[in-house]
Image (spheres, helix red, strand yellow):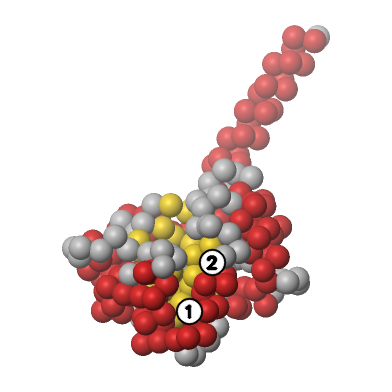
């Protein structure tokens, strides 16, 4: 499973990219609203930081605006993927953009049927939301598993991009069930990395190394 970062914070993207683990970035209007600056400049900078698909979301209700805004975003950089919502207009816009060779990530996907429609319309990625199901007391990972299974059995190449990831367990389970990608908030990257036994082990190795050096110098 490939790891994307789910943020528009350049600082966070730069930090996690420096680990050498990032294969892409997803943003959304909420994440962009948390950072200062011109949106297109932010997308350009992200494209410099990470060499992989960078999702930029269109906010529009009608097909012509979705298509023209999608084309405008895709022209910013070859790695830009246009993010569109899973709704009738989003499907039509996806199919038009896909015919132009523009990759689309269909977002706010909650069911296997929505994912199949997105794939049939030509979406390169479909983003099932996990955490938002958990928020309403439903099994987000269970729904993700249905989508992974349904698309896996289909003829489409659409990649399943697990989104609305809130915990390291979400990441691990998405990987175990065969999701193609998980897009992960910066905080969860840190939670994935840290383990008390790793920290304790490093501390002990450092102490033992220092003790050896001290004996050699004595
Ligand atoms: O980018 C879409 C998704 O990851 C949003 O997550 O935590 O706002 O449900 P969340």
Image quadrant where residue 146 sits: bottom left
Which percent across, then down, holds residue 83? 48, 73
Nearer-N-terminus badge (2/1):
1
Q: Which residue is mark 1?
A: 67
- Measured from the top left, where is residue 115 in percent x and y? 31, 74
Q: Is residue 111 left or right of residue 189?
A: left
Tag 2 and tag 1, C-beta contact below 8 Å: no
Q: Residue at x 35, y 75 (%)?
A: 95
Q: Position of residue 25 (x, y in %)?
A: 54, 60
Left or right position of 196 against 164: right
x then y, percent, for residue 70: 51, 74
Q: Residue shown at 61%/49% (left/top)?
A: 17
Q: Is residue 195 left or right of residue 111?
A: right
Task: Please state, as top left, top right, bottom left or bottom right, where the C terminus lies in the image.
Answer: top right
- Crowding near pointer 2: few (<14 within 10 Å), some, many (20+)? many
Asked if the beta carbon under badge 1 is closer than 8 A to the nearest atom of ligand 1, the reply is no
| Element under disc 2 | helix
On the image, numbered disc 2 is attached to which residue? 74
Please state which of residues 23 and 190 is positioned toward the viewer in this rendering: 23
Q: Which mark is residue 142?
A: none
Q: Residue visible at 25% across and 63% down?
A: 156
User: Which of the 4 quarters of the picture holds residue 35?
Assistant: bottom right
* Left or right placement of residue 146 versus residue 123 in this view: left
- Quadrant assignment, res 69: bottom right
């Amino acid at each position: 499973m490939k790891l994307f970062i789910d943020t528009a914070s350049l600082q966070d993207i730069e930090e996690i990219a420096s680990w050498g683990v990032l294969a892409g970035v997803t943003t959304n209007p909420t994440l962009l609203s948390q950072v200062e600056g011109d949106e297109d400049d932010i997308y350009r900078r992200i494209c410099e930081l990470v060499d992989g698909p960078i999702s930029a979301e269109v906010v529009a209700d009608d097909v012509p605006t979705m298509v023209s805004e999608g084309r405008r975003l895709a022209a910013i950089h070859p790695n830009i993927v246009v993010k569109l919502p899973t709704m009738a207009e989003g499907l039509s816009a996806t199919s038009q953009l896909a015919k132009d060779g523009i990759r689309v990530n269909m977002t706010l996907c909650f069911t296997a049927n929505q994912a199949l429609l997105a794939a049939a319309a030509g979406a390169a990625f479909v983003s099932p939301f996990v955490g938002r199901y958990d928020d309403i007391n439903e099994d987000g990972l269970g729904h993700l598993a249905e989508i992974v299974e349904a698309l896996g059995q289909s003829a489409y190449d659409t990649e399943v991009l697990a989104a609305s990831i809130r915990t390291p367990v979400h990441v691990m389970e998405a990987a175990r069930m065969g999701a193609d990608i998980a897009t992960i908030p910066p905080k969860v990257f840190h939670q994935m990395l840290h383990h008390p036994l790793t920290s304790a082990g490093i501390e002990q190795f450092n102490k033992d190394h220092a003790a050896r050096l001290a004996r050699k110098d004595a």
